[in-house]
Each structure stands twice: as structure tokens, then as C-alpha cells.
Amino acid sequence: MKVNKKLIVLTAIGTSAYIYKRVSDYTHDMLYRYSIVRNELQDNYTKIVRLRNHDGLIICGYLYERGPGHKTIIMMHRFLEDSTSLINEINYFKEHTDANILAVDAKAHGLSDGYHRGFGYEDITDLMLWNRYILKRYGQDHKILMYGQGLGASCILMCANKGKLKNVEAIISDGACADTGDYLVKHCFKKTAIPGFISYPIIKRMIRNEIDCNLSVMTPMNHIEDNKIPTLFIHSRMNKDVPLEDVFTLYNHAQCEKELFPVKEAYFYTMKDNEYAQTLISFINTYFK
């Protein structure tokens, strides 16, 4: 009987150690960039812009200019991707607007420097830096629209809530997550099959220890209520990165002028040309004249 108890204890310890290692390895993979793949947008009409952020890192963006103009769209990519993943969206905005376009690489993504990733929350100050860059380049009356995907959209929503964005006329949030902790837990479960009630405390502790951030604070749902900028919430029913219900959570929490735009297609730019598909164009024409 004593032997059986020892085996049970040893098995429990071994299982706990195994679980901790799996979750720890996953969290490290999410936090840190171990290799650098510097993809570049292959477009003769774009130029690479480099800025030094408050941490001394060089962050990069691709600027497509249409002359002096009076409008610019700033675009932010999904987590673990870079600006090259936005090429179809960039082409869509080129076709449907006359605005300049700036697609930026978040720190520790694409061409930008950085070892640890910011999960959208730590990218807020960099987004403010890009905002100031555009106004310095084109003038203080220049109009800006911000478009983001996934955690890039979450970053924009959290930054807007702080009232730090200048001359931003409208926001297009495409597939933003409502809760960063929930986002990480669900992706952890996909990779490890470890339930969220077990993985969440480990993930939260590691993020606090590694980058001194509280995961519960890094949550768009808790930051959106003070956003005053008109916002269009897009979400594809085929989005495998962020569940559809997140868009309803964010939309319901938002107190700004807002529109809800769930789509059945994988991407909004592949929609058939019908009245519903005009929701995006109508939003742009209304708020980004």
C-alpha cells in the first residue's frame, strides 16, 4: 500500500513537471523571437521607414505614397506575422481609397528589431510613435485611418482608449481578440491539449516574470469603453485565430460610433459586390473623407 502511495505521488509530480514544461515552452515560443526572417514587400512604389522607439529599438514600416495628399492609412498585422501578410488588404485600400498607406512591423516581427513580443499591449507606444511620424511628415491637419488584424487590431483599440491617437478619424478592427489571456490559453490548448484552468496561471506568471506585464491588464475588452473614435468591427466566420464571439464582446463594450460587420468569407476583400459588401466602403466614405 505504501509503495502504491509513493507511485501515485511520483506520478503526480512527474505529470505536474511535464505540464509545466509544455506550457512553459509554449509561452516562451509566444514571447520570444528565436530566429529572424526579414521578408520585404516587393513593391517598387513603397519605401522602408525606420524609427527608433523609446527602448532604442529600430522599428520598420512600409510607406506607399500618392503624393502629398491629406490622408494616410496605418496598418498593423496579426501576431507572429508581418506586413507582408497584409498585401491583399494593402491592394484593396489602394484600389478603394486615395490615401497613402503605412504598413508597420511590430517589434520582434518582420524587419523590426526586438527579442520579445508585445502581444499588442507593449506595441501601444510604438503605434503612437508612428502616429506622430505621419503628422510630422504631412502636417498637423493630416487625417489618419487605422486598420489592424488580430492582436494588431487589439493594439489599436487599446491605444485609442488611452486618448493618445491624434487625427485618427476612424478605426477598422479586423479579427481583434477580446481577451489576450484567453487568446493565449486557447492556442496553448491547440498545441498541448492542456486545459485553460491549468495553463492560464502558468502563462500569466511567466509573462509577469519575463516582461513585467500583467496579462489581465493586456486585455482589449478592459480598454475599449473609453474609445471615442468611430470603429468598424470586422470578423470572418472562418477566422481560425480568434473566435467569432470576440467581435460581439468588443462591439457590445464599445461606446463610440460603431458598426458590426461579420462576414462569412475568409477575407472581406473576396466578398461579392453586393449591398452588404459595401458596408466597409460606406464606413470609409463616411468617416475618412
Image (tube, rainbow, N blue to C red):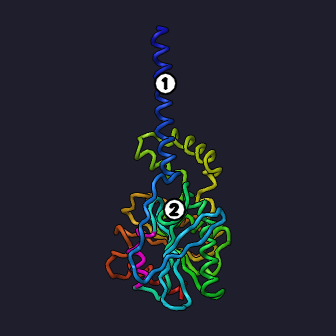
User: Tag 1: Cα neighbours inside 10 Å, few (<14), some, or many (≥20)?
Assistant: few
Left or right: 221 as drawn, with respect to 77: right
Which residue appears farthest toward the top when viewing the image? 1
- Residue 96 falls left or right of residue 158: left
Q: Amino acid at mark 1?
A: Ala
Dominant secondary structure of the residues highlighted in magenta in the image: helix
In the image, farthest residue toward the left:
272
User: Residue 43, can we see it?
Assistant: yes
From mark 2 to mark 1, how far is it between C-alphas? 36 Å
Other residues around mark 2 within 10 Å, as few (<14) / some (14–19) / many (≥20): many
Residue kind at label 2, given as amino acid type? Leu
To which residue does mark 1 refer? 12
Seen in the picture, residue 201 relative to 247 is either above or below; the reply is above
Q: Which residues are magenta?
A: 83-94
Count of residue discs: 2
Q: Position of residue 210 (x, y in %)?
A: 61, 47
Q: Which residue is mark 2?
A: 151
Viewer-proximal residue among 252 and 240: 240
Residue 36 circle label = none
**Which type of secondary structure does the marked residue at label 1 adopt?**
helix
Q: Earlier in the sequence, mark 2 or mark 1?
A: 1
